[in-house]
Image: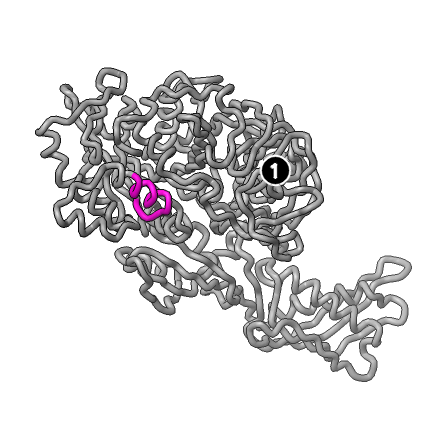
Amino acid sequence: MSDKGGGHGGQAAAGSAQLSPARGAAIRNVVLVGHTGAGKTTLVETLLAAVGAIGRPGRVEDGNTVCDFEEIEHRLGRSVGLAAAPLLVDGIKVNLLDAPGYADFAGDLRAGLRAADAALFVVSAADGVDGSTQLLWEECAAVGLPRAVVVTKLDAARADFDEMVLICQRVFGDGVAPLYLPLLDDEEQVGGVIGLLSQQIFDYSSGEREVLEADPEHLELIEPARNALIEGIIAESEDETLMDRYLGGEDIDVKVLVDDLETAVSRGHFYPVIPVSAATGVGTAELLELVTQGFPAPGEHLIPAVTTPDGEPKAPLACDPDGPLVAEVVKTTSDPYVGRISLVRVFSGTLRPDTPVHVSGHGMALRGHPDHDVDEKVGALSSPLGKTQRPVEFAAAGDLVAVAKLAHAETGDTLSAKEDPALMEPWVMPDPLLPVAVTARAKSDEDKLAQALSRLVAEDPTLRLEINPETHQLVLWCLGEAHRDVLLDRLATRYGVAVETVAHRVSLRETFGAHTKGRGRHVKQSGGHGQYAICEIEVEPLPAGSGFEFVDKVVGGAVPRHFIPSVEKGVRTQMERGVLAGYPVVDLRVTLVDGKAHSVDSSDMAFQTAGALALKDAASQGGRPTLLEPVEAVEITLADEFVGAVLGDLSSRRGRVLGTEPTDAGRTVVRAEVPATGLARYPVELRSLSHGTGQFTREYLRHEPMPANLAAKVIEELGE
């Protein structure tokens, strides 16, 4: 990052021999983030090619580009998972984590943030910065993660580097400033960059990086940006005299500025902008210099809190290879040939193959990931590069490594010493709010489907699996439609299970709207013992949330005492089946007032049947059965300019807006009550309405009567 004309010049090697295990100070863990289409994966390939790890960007191996995560990315045209790529730069191992940019894969993005010690925000010079990228910047700022901005696609038709810098400064805030400016060659293409501190030109137009001294024309061109950069660096300097000296006209030594710049970047106080062309390699050497010299080593990054699996606090960890073993699974994949592969970040201690470890996972039970503690034996360790695994002897604190054959480990689990088990504080995951109901296409696929889904749940903590006890549907709760498509594709291609999606059914209820009476008569004679039971009931609705009450007012033994519980059981059974559309009946008082029995033919089962018939009869005798729909409390956070559109949309969903409240950073919180039937596709539609800035939560409140026209439609659909 020194911008002095040094560096590796793009020629450092990164073969398997060079990528031997590294230790803390010689490691950089960097996640690349940004919107889909900004060029993150292409940039990773360009950097790998620059250091000799691959032949050239986009080179195909076995039908896949070397950095692609899986085949589905080619069909969808976007990254769908977290991919790791290690490279060696001047003796420092750089673990690049390519995080997906699409919001549906935010789980992998959050995993990348957890595993990294710094972030590169990749933005396109032609496309600007979207709302989700701004939210991610603020999330990184909240935890103090060091950041830099890489501007790509410099040769695109609408590319404007200067305009993109202004956009980044406006969106990301103070501390964002270019460290280099792009320069055009004789063919009006970006052929190199000029360093604002060194005032040198780094020319790539010949195919090799050349360092040239800037001429007066270039010096005049960069003077405003150079002055702004120097002032920004000095503002972050710990030397309080530096600003006065600079304002007094003193020419500050470049080495002093570079040292202060590197400190400010490492501490997350300053955010350099670097232009990079993946097509020509322009800026790659400068970017790698920034990563190795400006970004912090793992030992400079705070380690999350650690407890025992029982929740007892443990001493804070240090990034020490000789410390207690504590590592975390940040990504899990299943390979049809080698089984489960876990991408692991080692925070403390040293992980070695063929050693026992304790696997602990807690806090995800609500998403279908039950708490678990188990001892396992670590399989082979390797350094991942796309689908290529390069064996390593160990992984020391601060490093990332792929671990084979951890049969029970899931994404988010903690690995620790068997004799000293630990549990890391889990990272925050987005809630899956898009329901997708599925069924196996063939009866023979049902067992395979259950096994495949259990593996998908282990891989993806943002997937919630639900078997609804009321609708009896198998529901995958996803982050969005792209997330859904990837899951269904994996079921079909990876596990060979064909499924069909069906309409998701909301858990409705039924109740009575009026006081009424009913009679149940179950009399049959077919030789031998017959069946005889008659009961008369009164039914009255109760206030919402009251539940069910059964009252016995039989006099004179019209219904023998030992059959009265049978009547209640029959009524309860019919309530579960429903009396209108097959949904459970709630908030009801049923009073048994009379009945008849036979000394021989009456039985428990006969009175259960009579009780059920009596409730059905009451529904048809003026009980006005009504459908109830769930209503949910919804809280939406979004950019101010989209509040009007969202409020109008909520009204179209029969939502009741309770209020709005401004928050910081130009956003508003909207609170509303919305019927669950109006939220089926809300994650997708809110994203569109808010241009990616909207997030929401939902929580069940109560059931309340559904409008008659909608209830009639539900009943009609069930009858088809």
Is residue 77 part of the magenta span, yes or no?
Answer: no
What residue is disc 1 on? 455
> Whole-percent x and y of residue 105?
45, 41
Amino acid type indicated by mark 1: Arg
User: Alpha-carbon neighbours of circle 1 within 10 Å: few (<14), some, or many (≥20)?
Assistant: some
What is the magenta segment's predominant secondary structure?
helix
Residue at disc 1, secondary structure: helix
Q: Is residue 719 above or below residue 600?
A: above
Q: As drawn, is 552 to the left or to the right of 206?
A: right
Query: From this viewpoint, is residue 483 visible?
Result: no
What is the quadrant of the N terminus in the image?
top left
Please provide the residue range marked out in magenta.
259-270
Residue with the most extreme bottom position: 556
Q: In this view, does 495 lie above or below 168?
A: above
Between residues 126 and 210, which one lies in front from this camera angle?
210
> Whole-percent x and y of residue 55?
40, 16
Q: In which quarter of the image is residue 37?
A: top left
Between residues 680 and 227, which one lies in front from this camera angle?
227
Between residues 430 and 146, which one lies in front from this camera angle?
146
Q: Residue at x 27, y 22 (%)?
A: 280
Between residues 593 and 107, which one lies in front from this camera angle?
107
